[in-house]
Image (cartoon, helix red, strand yellow):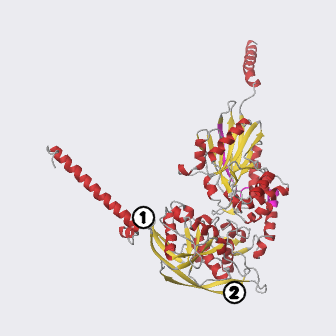
């Protein structure tokens, strides 16, 4: 009996001791943020190169629902570049498909990236108007340091569209007892990648401090920056790390633009930086525990792969199918194509270039060949001038996988930009360079690529060799013009039937002849509009050591690239992507030729340390470097000799005499 009473009294005492704890409300609150960035209009899954699939908004919705079920008060945000990357982007200015779909996905807020301005600032405004006119939900759009320039002729119209949508610098949201402050930033490099935006960039740090101060005044307990600045392994290029170092009070930075995948957050002071990777590959999730004193403790961080293991959400799948139908009835109708039309087949993968790896690439060579083919088979006014076609690593946005190659897959490869006709896709342009400048273009590939991987070039109509260990801007050791004679014959377009009257082209044989470039002769260069515009920046990128000045056929400098656009017999622009699509279609049921399964040697990259190979055919840069090196060696030998004899004289008491 005494034992029972003692046990009872002990229980009462323990309960009384716990009452204060049970009665006091816990100060800990949970913060969960779900995030994406660089979605690039990836509404539908793509082959991942490993036998599976990646991305797709119907699968993303399933992942979001699962995460929200576990964390009902989670926020969902995006770090910009939600547009440009698939055929559905062709509805950007008329439907605003990206933001409307993000609204259906339940996004709370997003910021803009450089690709939101591929259709210029005016196209951005039209997109906002389309979303507003739809009456459908859309995320808050936050832009703290990016405004229409005063000299932008469309400034007032753009401002009205931004006001109608409700674009603002920052927003306050309350969720689960936590007051969130969210603001959006455009990065400096991102702004530089949007030359046609017509917007001005305010200093990111100054704008961030202004937003942090304003949000704290409004009672924000957790501050999120949606930044399209990015991170980089090189600290001086890592804009969002510098932002976190210089601006206090930001709890979380969702970092877009550089397409980074961070399996663990970067922590700078008390700021966490996160990235989930591009193209809807992953959904990021980060969770903190907040204390009463405002302190935060990271409790979970993970990236959920958006792949074939996730089922489609029926509502989003239906929405995407509706967008596909609109694309087929509008943009693709003029080409006689449909979204999923099979153009040809591939018996092997054609991957995008590996960033930073200087080598040949089959996809790059295929695209360059398609540009050259387009000048012979699609362009209305062909030229008899020897022609070289060029494409760059930075514009090749997606691989081609083994199996059927469809219209949408081809568009994904060359999805960037907009033409002078206002429709998606950069057009091909034809400009002229001298033989000396073409050699400089090969030198750009050889010397600038290690500094800017996106500048790696792939050419048709020219072959060249370079050694990666030679002196910068003197790495090219051999270069020749390649003139190809393609003998073609009409053949029915794949799937059309011989009675349809539709004909494509089948390449039967290719004859090649080689000749040396003449420094003072003009050669025609065909490339995409973006790459053509970048040619004139080579001088600044190479510190004035290389120069490329695009010219007209008469040698006069190009002042308007729109005058150089390649057009078909109907006067329509020949888009980059369509040149590739038509070239692939020419292969018919036989599929992409096996010669594209491996690089064909048109770019020969040597990494030899053979001294003769390193110094043969030196230009003035190498000669200057050799002179300086020789002079330094002689001086070093003299100093060593002087020190030796000086020590010897001191040792034998003769250090005061010479």
Relative to the observer, which residue lies in front, 522 or 404? 522
Left or right position of 524 against 199: left
Left or right position of 546 against 161: left
* Residue 105, horizontal then vertical, whole percent: 78, 52
* Residue 383, horizontal then vertical, whole percent: 61, 83
Badge number at residue 471 = 1
Left or right position of 459 against 332: left
Q: Do the residues labelled 1 and 2 touch (CB within 8 Å)?
A: no
Q: Mark 2 points at which residue?
A: 490
Q: Which residue appears at 73% of the width and 29% of the height?
A: 26
1 vs 2, front mark: 1
Q: Quadrant of residue 15?
A: top right
Q: Which residue appears at 54% of the width and 79% of the height?
A: 522
* Residue 111, horizontal then vertical, whole percent: 71, 51
Residue 299 sits inside the magenta stretch: yes
Mark 1: which secondary structure? loop
Q: Which residue appears at 23% of the width and 49% of the height?
A: 643
* Residue 571, horizontal then vertical, whole percent: 72, 78
For mark 1, does the 10 Å Cα neighbourhood hold few (<14), some (14 to 19), or many (20 or more) residues? some
Relative to the observer, which residue lies in front, 132 or 251? 132
From this view, report whether residue 294 is shown above or below residue 462: above
Q: In which quarter of the image is residue 280?
A: bottom right
Span colored in magenta: 297-319
Looking at the image, can residue 311 be seen?
no
From this view, report whether residue 72 is shown above or below residue 498: above
């Amino acid at each position: 009996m005494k034992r029972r009473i003692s046990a009872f009294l002990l229980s009462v005492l323990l309960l009384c001791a716990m009452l204060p704890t049970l009665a006091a409300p816990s100060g800990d609150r949970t913060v969960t943020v779900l995030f994406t960035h660089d979605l690039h209009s990836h509404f539908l899954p793509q082959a991942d190169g490993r036998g599976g699939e990646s991305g797709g908004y119907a699968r993303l919705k399933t992942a979001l629902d699962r995460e929200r079920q576990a964390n009902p008060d989670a926020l969902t945000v995006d770090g910009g570049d939600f547009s440009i990357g698939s055929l559905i982007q062709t509805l950007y200015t008329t439907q605003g498909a990206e933001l409307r779909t993000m609204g259906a996905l339940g996004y709370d807020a997003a910021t803009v990236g450089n690709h939101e301005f591929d259709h210029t600032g005016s196209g951005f405004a039209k997109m906002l108007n389309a979303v507003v006119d739809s009456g459908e939900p859309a995320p808050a759009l936050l832009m703290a340091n990016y405004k229409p320039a005063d000299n932008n002729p469309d400034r007032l119209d753009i401002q009205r569209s931004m006001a109608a949508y409700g674009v603002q610098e920052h927003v306050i949201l309350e969720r689960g007892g936590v007051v969130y402050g969210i603001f959006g930033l455009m990065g400096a490099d991102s702004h530089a990648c949007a030359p046609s935006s017509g917007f001005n960039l305010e200093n990111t740090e100054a704008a961030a401090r202004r937003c942090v101060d304003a949000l704290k005044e409004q009672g924000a307990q957790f501050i999120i920056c949606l930044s399209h600045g990015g991170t980089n392994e090189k600290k001086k290029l890592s804009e969002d790390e510098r932002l976190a170092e210089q601006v206090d009070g930001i709890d979380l930075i969702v970092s877009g633009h550089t397409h980074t995948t961070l399996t663990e957050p970067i922590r700078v002071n008390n700021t966490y930086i996160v990235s989930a990777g591009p193209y809807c590959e992953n959904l990021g999730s980060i969770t903190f525990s907040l204390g009463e004193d405002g302190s935060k403790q990271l409790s979970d961080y993970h990236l959920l792969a958006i792949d074939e293991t996730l089922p489609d959400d029926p509502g989003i799948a239906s929405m995407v199918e509706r967008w596909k139908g609109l694309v087929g009835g509008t943009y693709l109708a003029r080409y006689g194509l449909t979204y999923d039309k099979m153009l040809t087949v591939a018996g092997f993968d054609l991957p995008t270039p590996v960033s930073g790896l200087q080598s040949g690439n089959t996809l790059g060579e295929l695209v360059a060949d398609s540009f050259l083919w387009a000048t012979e088979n699609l362009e209305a006014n062909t030229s008899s001038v020897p022609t070289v076609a060029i494409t760059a690593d930075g514009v090749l946005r997606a691989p081609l996988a083994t199996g059927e190659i469809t219209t949408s897959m081809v568009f994904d490869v060359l999805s960037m930009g907009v033409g002078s006709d206002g429709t998606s896709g950069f057009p091909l342009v034809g400009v002229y360079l001298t033989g000396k400048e073409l050699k400089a273009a090969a030198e750009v590939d050889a010397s600038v690529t290690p500094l800017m991987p996106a500048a790696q070039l792939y050419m048709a109509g020219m072959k060249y060799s370079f050694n990666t260990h030679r002196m910068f801007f003197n790495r090219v050791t051999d270069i020749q013009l390649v003139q190809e004679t393609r003998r073609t014959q009409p053949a029915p377009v794949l799937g059309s039937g011989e009675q349809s009257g539709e004909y494509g082209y089948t390449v039967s044989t290719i004859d090649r002849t080689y000749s040396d470039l003449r420094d003072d002769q003009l050669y025609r260069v065909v490339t995409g509009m973006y790459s053509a515009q970048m040619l004139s920046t080579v001088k600044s990128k190479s510190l004035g050591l290389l120069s490329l000045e695009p010219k007209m056929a008469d040698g006069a400098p190009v002042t308007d690239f729109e005058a150089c656009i390649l057009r078909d017999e109907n006067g329509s622009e020949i888009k980059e992507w369509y040149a590739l699509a038509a070239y692939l279609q020419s292969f018919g049921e036989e599929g992409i030729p096996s010669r594209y399964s491996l690089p064909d040697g048109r770019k020969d990259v040597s990494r030899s340390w053979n001294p003769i190979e390193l110094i043969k055919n030196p230009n003035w840069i190498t000669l200057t470097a050799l002179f300086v090196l020789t002079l330094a060696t002689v001086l070093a030998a003299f100093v060593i000799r002087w020190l030796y004899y000086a020590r010897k004289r001191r040792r034998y008491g003769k250090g005061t005499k010479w």
